[in-house]
Image (tube, rainbow, N blue to C red):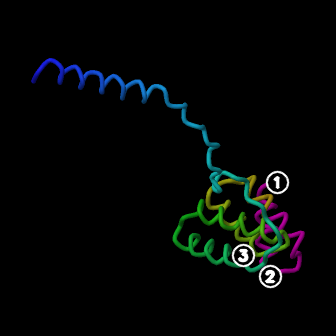
Amino acid sequence: MPPRAGRSWLITGLFAALLCLAQAPPVEEPPEEDEALAPKEYAYNPLQAKKEVQIGRFYLKKGSYKAAAGRFREATKWDEKYAEAYLLLGEACEKLKDDGCARQAYERFLVLAPKAKEAERARKYLARQR
Protein backbone atom coordinates (compact mmCIF):
# COMPACT_ATOMS: atom_id res chain seq x y z
CA MET A 1 0.00 0.00 0.00
CA PRO A 2 1.46 3.37 -0.95
CA PRO A 3 2.01 5.83 1.92
CA ARG A 4 -0.77 8.09 0.69
CA ALA A 5 -3.38 5.32 0.79
CA GLY A 6 -2.45 4.52 4.40
CA ARG A 7 -2.80 8.16 5.33
CA SER A 8 -6.24 8.45 3.75
CA TRP A 9 -7.42 5.47 5.76
CA LEU A 10 -6.01 7.00 8.91
CA ILE A 11 -7.65 10.35 8.19
CA THR A 12 -10.96 8.66 7.37
CA GLY A 13 -10.82 6.66 10.62
CA LEU A 14 -10.02 9.74 12.70
CA PHE A 15 -12.79 11.68 10.99
CA ALA A 16 -15.30 8.88 11.75
CA ALA A 17 -14.19 8.79 15.40
CA LEU A 18 -14.62 12.56 15.70
CA LEU A 19 -18.11 12.32 14.20
CA CYS A 20 -19.07 9.71 16.79
CA LEU A 21 -17.79 11.87 19.63
CA ALA A 22 -19.40 15.03 18.27
CA GLN A 23 -22.92 13.58 18.30
CA ALA A 24 -25.33 14.99 20.84
CA PRO A 25 -25.81 12.85 23.93
CA PRO A 26 -28.82 10.56 23.72
CA VAL A 27 -32.03 12.01 25.08
CA GLU A 28 -33.02 10.30 28.31
CA GLU A 29 -36.52 8.94 28.11
CA PRO A 30 -38.57 8.66 31.24
CA PRO A 31 -38.84 5.09 32.50
CA GLU A 32 -41.92 3.22 31.44
CA GLU A 33 -44.41 2.75 34.19
CA ASP A 34 -44.80 -0.87 35.08
CA GLU A 35 -48.48 -1.49 35.69
CA ALA A 36 -47.63 -4.28 38.10
CA LEU A 37 -45.86 -1.77 40.36
CA ALA A 38 -48.76 0.67 40.45
CA PRO A 39 -51.09 0.25 43.42
CA LYS A 40 -54.20 -1.64 42.42
CA GLU A 41 -57.43 0.29 42.65
CA TYR A 42 -60.52 -1.56 43.79
CA ALA A 43 -64.12 -0.68 43.10
CA TYR A 44 -67.16 -2.68 44.10
CA ASN A 45 -67.20 -5.68 41.77
CA PRO A 46 -69.09 -8.70 43.12
CA LEU A 47 -68.40 -10.77 40.00
CA GLN A 48 -64.64 -10.37 40.43
CA ALA A 49 -64.99 -11.16 44.13
CA LYS A 50 -66.85 -14.37 43.29
CA LYS A 51 -64.12 -15.37 40.82
CA GLU A 52 -61.44 -14.76 43.45
CA VAL A 53 -63.34 -16.96 45.92
CA GLN A 54 -63.67 -19.75 43.33
CA ILE A 55 -59.94 -19.69 42.68
CA GLY A 56 -59.25 -19.47 46.40
CA ARG A 57 -61.41 -22.56 47.02
CA PHE A 58 -59.32 -24.44 44.46
CA TYR A 59 -56.12 -23.47 46.26
CA LEU A 60 -57.65 -24.35 49.63
CA LYS A 61 -58.56 -27.86 48.40
CA LYS A 62 -55.03 -28.32 47.01
CA GLY A 63 -53.49 -27.33 50.33
CA SER A 64 -51.99 -24.08 49.01
CA TYR A 65 -53.21 -22.07 51.97
CA LYS A 66 -51.07 -19.00 51.34
CA ALA A 67 -52.35 -18.70 47.76
CA ALA A 68 -55.91 -19.30 48.95
CA ALA A 69 -55.63 -16.61 51.61
CA GLY A 70 -54.34 -14.17 48.99
CA ARG A 71 -57.34 -14.84 46.76
CA PHE A 72 -59.80 -14.48 49.61
CA ARG A 73 -58.18 -11.17 50.60
CA GLU A 74 -58.58 -10.00 47.00
CA ALA A 75 -62.25 -10.98 47.12
CA THR A 76 -62.79 -8.89 50.25
CA LYS A 77 -61.27 -5.89 48.49
CA TRP A 78 -63.62 -6.25 45.52
CA ASP A 79 -66.65 -6.70 47.79
CA GLU A 80 -66.18 -5.65 51.41
CA LYS A 81 -69.49 -7.23 52.43
CA TYR A 82 -68.86 -10.69 50.97
CA ALA A 83 -69.23 -12.76 54.14
CA GLU A 84 -68.18 -16.06 52.56
CA ALA A 85 -64.83 -14.57 51.54
CA TYR A 86 -64.13 -13.62 55.17
CA LEU A 87 -65.14 -17.08 56.40
CA LEU A 88 -62.82 -18.78 53.91
CA LEU A 89 -60.04 -16.31 54.66
CA GLY A 90 -60.40 -17.26 58.30
CA GLU A 91 -60.08 -20.95 57.41
CA ALA A 92 -57.01 -20.38 55.26
CA CYS A 93 -55.35 -18.25 57.93
CA GLU A 94 -56.18 -20.88 60.52
CA LYS A 95 -54.39 -23.49 58.39
CA LEU A 96 -51.42 -21.12 58.10
CA LYS A 97 -51.37 -20.78 61.92
CA ASP A 98 -51.87 -17.02 61.51
CA ASP A 99 -54.17 -16.46 64.47
CA GLY A 100 -54.37 -12.69 64.06
CA CYS A 101 -55.52 -12.96 60.46
CA ALA A 102 -58.00 -15.74 61.27
CA ARG A 103 -59.43 -13.82 64.22
CA GLN A 104 -59.96 -10.65 62.16
CA ALA A 105 -61.54 -12.59 59.31
CA TYR A 106 -63.91 -14.53 61.57
CA GLU A 107 -64.88 -11.37 63.48
CA ARG A 108 -65.72 -9.61 60.22
CA PHE A 109 -67.65 -12.68 59.05
CA LEU A 110 -69.74 -12.62 62.22
CA VAL A 111 -70.50 -8.93 61.75
CA LEU A 112 -71.71 -9.59 58.20
CA ALA A 113 -73.49 -12.91 58.76
CA PRO A 114 -74.19 -13.49 62.48
CA LYS A 115 -76.98 -16.00 61.78
CA ALA A 116 -75.23 -18.04 59.09
CA LYS A 117 -74.92 -21.77 59.74
CA GLU A 118 -71.10 -21.44 59.73
CA ALA A 119 -71.25 -18.70 62.38
CA GLU A 120 -71.07 -21.19 65.23
CA ARG A 121 -67.76 -22.57 63.95
CA ALA A 122 -66.34 -19.04 63.80
CA ARG A 123 -67.59 -18.32 67.34
CA LYS A 124 -65.94 -21.50 68.64
CA TYR A 125 -62.63 -20.53 67.07
CA LEU A 126 -62.80 -17.05 68.60
CA ALA A 127 -63.71 -18.50 72.01
CA ARG A 128 -60.65 -20.80 71.87
CA GLN A 129 -58.43 -17.79 71.12
CA ARG A 130 -59.49 -15.87 74.23
**Residues at discs 3 and 1 in contact (Cβ within 8 Å):** no
Give the secondary structure at mark 1. Answer: loop
Mark 3 vs mark 1, foreground winner is 3
Mark 3 vs mark 2, foreground winner is 3
Q: Nearer the viewer, residue 110 or 127?
A: 110
Using residue 51 as the reference point, say whether residue 60 is left or right of it: left
Inter-mark Cα distance, 3 to 1: 35 Å
Dot label at residue 1: none
Examine the image and state in which quarter residue 18 appears: top left
| The magenta segment | 106-130
Amino acid identity at mark 1: Arg
The image quadrant where one finds the C terminus is: bottom right
Q: Which residue is drawn at 78% across and 55% down?
A: 129
Give the secondary structure at mark 2. Answer: loop
Q: Which secondary structure class fits the magenta region best?
A: helix
Give the secondary structure at mark 3. Answer: helix
Mark 2 highlights which residue?
117
Above-or-below relation of 30 to 99 = above
Amino acid identity at mark 2: Lys
Mark 3 surroundings within 10 Å by alpha-carbon count, few (fewer than 14), some (14 through 19), many (20 or more): some
Q: Position of residue 106 (x, y in %)?
A: 79, 65
Nearer the N terminus, badge 3 or badge 1? 3
Q: Where is residue 119 in the image (x, y as percent from the top left)?
A: 81, 74
Mark 3 highlights which residue?
48
Amino acid identity at mark 3: Gln
Q: Does the magenta stretch include residue 31?
A: no
The image quadrant where one finds the N terminus is: top left
Mark 1 highlights which residue?
130
Using residue 71 as the reference point, say whether residue 82 is left or right of it: right
Inter-mark Cα distance, 2 to 1: 22 Å
